């Protein structure tokens, strides 16, 4: 950890292990399930855009998938695409979507990325919640 702080390279989820990955997902889940949809309605024009039939939403850094699952429940006409760089997180997200009964609306995939670049088919829409930023893209 000391080297990660000194170099700024960070520590990967693989190095941290499953308990850290699952703990982060479990910690985020209540907010996503109970607050995300309400928070998004407070962003000007966002609710109307998300409610459009056939809207596609890209959730970058989807982790365990709870934000994508919450979006699919709040906007059942939307197609949600969750992307993450961590393979075990993508697998966990897919399993969570199956268990939540939204696997037909939410898709998860592993993809290397450096931020929001490389997803030109989506319109960039940064959303802030509490102390971190998530990027959702709509098309």
Image: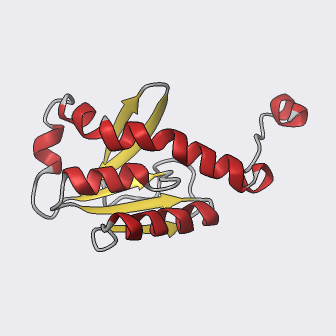
Q: Residue 133 location in percent, x, y?
A: 45, 34
Q: Residue 17 location in percent, x, y?
A: 75, 54
Name the residue rendered at 82%, 30% in the picture. Answer: 5
- Give the residue furthest to the top: 131
Nearest the viewer among 63 and 122 is 63
124 vs 77, left or right, is right
Name the residue rendered at 70%, 56% in the picture. Answer: 18
Q: Quadrant of residue 88?
A: bottom right
Instruction: Count the numbered circles shown.
Output: 0
Q: Residue 9 location in percent, x, y?
A: 78, 40
- Determine whether 75 is above or below 30 in the image: below
Q: Quadrant of residue 53?
A: bottom left
Visual colour scheme: secondary structure
Q: Quadrant of the C terminus?
A: bottom left
Nearest the viewer among 34 and 10 is 34
Q: Residue 104 location in percent, x, y?
A: 29, 74
Name the residue rendered at 47%, 60% in the picture. Answer: 83
63 vs 134, left or right, is right
């Amino acid at each position: 950890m000391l080297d990660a702080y000194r170099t700024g390279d960070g520590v990967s989820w693989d190095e941290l292990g499953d308990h850290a990955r699952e703990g982060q997902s479990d910690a985020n889940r209540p907010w996503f399930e109970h607050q995300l949809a309400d928070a998004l309605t407070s962003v000007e024009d966002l609710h109307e855009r998300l409610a459009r039939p056939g809207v596609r939403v890209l959730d970058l850094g989807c982790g365990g998938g709870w934000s994508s699952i919450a979006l699919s429940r709040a906007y059942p006409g939307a197609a949600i695409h969750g992307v993450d760089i961590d393979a075990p997180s993508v697998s966990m997200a897919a399993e969570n979507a199956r268990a939540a009964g939204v696997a037909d609306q939410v898709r998860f995939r592993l993809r290397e990325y450096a931020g929001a670049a490389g997803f030109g088919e989506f319109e960039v829409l940064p959303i802030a919640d509490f102390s971190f930023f998530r990027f959702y893209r709509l098309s």
